[in-house]
């Protein structure tokens, strides 16, 4: 430490930043509004450790790649990691404390996650996430509740113009099954399609000898779908029952969202896939203008809890608070800043009198600073 000058110590490591004053007040205000919305839906707070055993985020579970994890050892030699994602942590916790519970379980959270990657492109290595998880409920109503709660959370955060795009990974997997595709080809195709690199996807399908009718089926899903009517048309030509049921599930969710009165915020994209391989059904992302990344993502993950010893359906979503705040600022959404504290000055002679005044104001809930008169 001695070799560093104080100038170097004033800076944070790459990919980290400080939050303070009005900046942090905005964070707290938005987080509070979102959390209030989650509580209205009956979700309870949950807090999991900042670091967990490596196996909680292992390759088998399908979460963040090992190379992107912050790893270290405890004194027993066990490998620990800073959490890159809340969902596996919450799943581990629920499997431990609610193993025999059959009723739906609702929890919400807020906290830091960590990504150890050098290709940041301006992304943070420590960021704040908020989210909600609904477990022990595999129904279409649970899927719709997640989308509705996300929609109302974004509205509570002050966004007015945003779109939640829905997809279903089961449709993609169904087409892969029908085409008899091997695991490696499916993995490469998933990366190309999720990255919207459709020309590379077409080349891959041709080079692997996939039949033309299935190539056309994959390329057909690249068409943007804006309504349930288009989904119904796509279901008529689905290559197998697995893909058909995936589309029918999306149509059902959309029908329930109409009952919520939120259908205007929803569209469909069958190319929507996730880097997290634990998703098993409906997935979704929310986009708004001013930022190039999604302001929320989520979906169904019915096999994740089984890795921790509990067979239970589950669904949830995550909001990257840093990106959401940036979107608000880019859209010039006004921030209702808290009032500045009242200043009460004192001298050596007037200190006790000033203190009594301050004590009375603070009892009334007024924010007060007690300031020496000679430093004004």
Image (cartoon, helix red, strand yellow):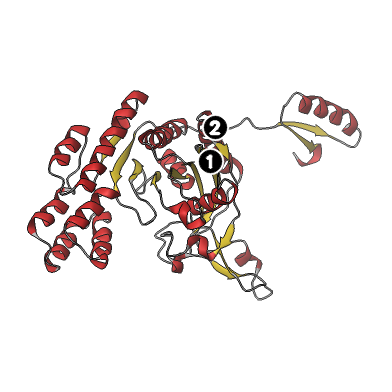
When asked about the image quadrant of residue 198, the answer is bottom left
Task: Say if 232 sits above or below 76 in the image.
Answer: above
The answer to whether residue 12 is seen in the rendering is no
Q: Quarter of the image containing the N terminus?
A: bottom right
Identified at 27% across, 56% down, the residue is 195
Task: Say if 27 sits above or below 76 in the image.
Answer: above
Left-right relation of 19 to 186: right
Tag 1 residue = 108
When asked about the image quadrant of residue 46, the answer is top right
Q: Earlier in the sequence, mark 2 or mark 1?
A: 2
Q: Secondary structure at mark 1?
A: strand
The reply to whether discs 2 and 1 touch (Cβ–Cβ < 8 Å) is yes
x then y, percent, for residue 186: 25, 62
Identified at 45% across, 45% down, the residue is 318
Tag 2 residue = 39
x then y, percent, for residue 237: 12, 43
Q: Nearer the viewer, residue 301 or 189?
A: 301
x then y, percent, for residue 88: 49, 54
Task: Say if 243 sits above or below 354 in the image.
Answer: below
- What is the residue that sits farthest to the right in this orientation? 349
Tell me the crowding category of disc 1: few under 14, some 14 to 19, or many 20 or more residues within 10 angstroms, Cα based. Answer: many
- What is the residue that sits farthest to the left in this orientation? 212
Tell me, for residue 327, which label it has, or none.
none
Q: Secondary structure at mark 2?
A: helix
- What is the residue that sits farthest to the bottom in this orientation? 3
Identified at 49% across, 43% down, the residue is 131
Q: Nearer the viewer, residue 24 or 207?
A: 207
Left-right relation of 308 to 264: right
Left-right relation of 139 to 21: left
x then y, percent, for residue 115: 48, 60
Q: CA distance from mark 2 to mark 1?
A: 8 Å
The answer to whether residue 349 is seen in the rendering is yes
């Amino acid at each position: 430490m001695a070799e560093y000058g104080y100038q170097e110590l004033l800076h944070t490591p790459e990919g980290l930043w400080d939050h303070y004053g009005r900046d942090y007040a905005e964070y707290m205000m938005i987080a509070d509004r979102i959390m209030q919305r989650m509580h209205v839906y009956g979700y309870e707070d949950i807090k999991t450790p900042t670091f967990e055993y490596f196996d909680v985020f292992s390759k088998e579970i399908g979460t963040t790649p090992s190379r992107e994890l912050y790893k270290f050892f405890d004194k027993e030699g066990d490998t620990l990691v800073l959490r890159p994602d809340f969902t596996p942590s919450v799943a581990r916790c629920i499997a431990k404390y609610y193993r025999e519970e059959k009723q739906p379980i609702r929890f919400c959270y807020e906290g830091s996650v960590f990504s150890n990657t050098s290709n940041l492109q301006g992304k943070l290595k420590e960021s704040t996430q908020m989210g909600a998880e609904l477990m022990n409920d595999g129904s279409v109503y649970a899927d719709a509740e997640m989308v509705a709660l996300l929609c109302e959370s974004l509205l509570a955060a002050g966004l007015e113009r945003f779109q939640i795009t829905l997809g279903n990974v089961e449709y993609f997997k169904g087409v892969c099954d029908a085409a008899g595709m091997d695991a490696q080809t499916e993995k490469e195709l998933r990366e190309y399609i999720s990255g919207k690199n459709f020309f590379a996807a077409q080349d891959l399908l041709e080079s692997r000898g996939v039949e033309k009718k299935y190539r056309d089926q994959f390329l057909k899903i690249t068409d943007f779908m804006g309504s349930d009517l288009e989904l119904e048309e796509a279901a008529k030509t689905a290559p197998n029952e697995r893909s058909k049921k995936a589309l029918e599930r999306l149509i059902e969710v959309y029908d329930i969202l109409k009952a919520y009165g939120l259908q205007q915020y929803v569209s469909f994209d069958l190319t929507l896939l996730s880097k997290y391989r634990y998703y098993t059904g409906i997935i979704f992302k929310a986009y708004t203008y001013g930022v190039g990344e999604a302001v929320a993502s989520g979906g169904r993950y019915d096999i994740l809890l089984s890795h921790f010893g509990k067979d239970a359906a589950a669904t949830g979503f995550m909001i990257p608070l840093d990106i959401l705040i940036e979107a608000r600022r880019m859209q010039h959404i006004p921030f209702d800043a808290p009032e500045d504290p009242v200043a009460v000055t004192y001298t050596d002679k007037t200190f006790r009198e000033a203190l009594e005044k301050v004590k009375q104001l603070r009892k009334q809930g007024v924010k007060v600073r007690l300031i020496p008169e000679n430093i004004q």
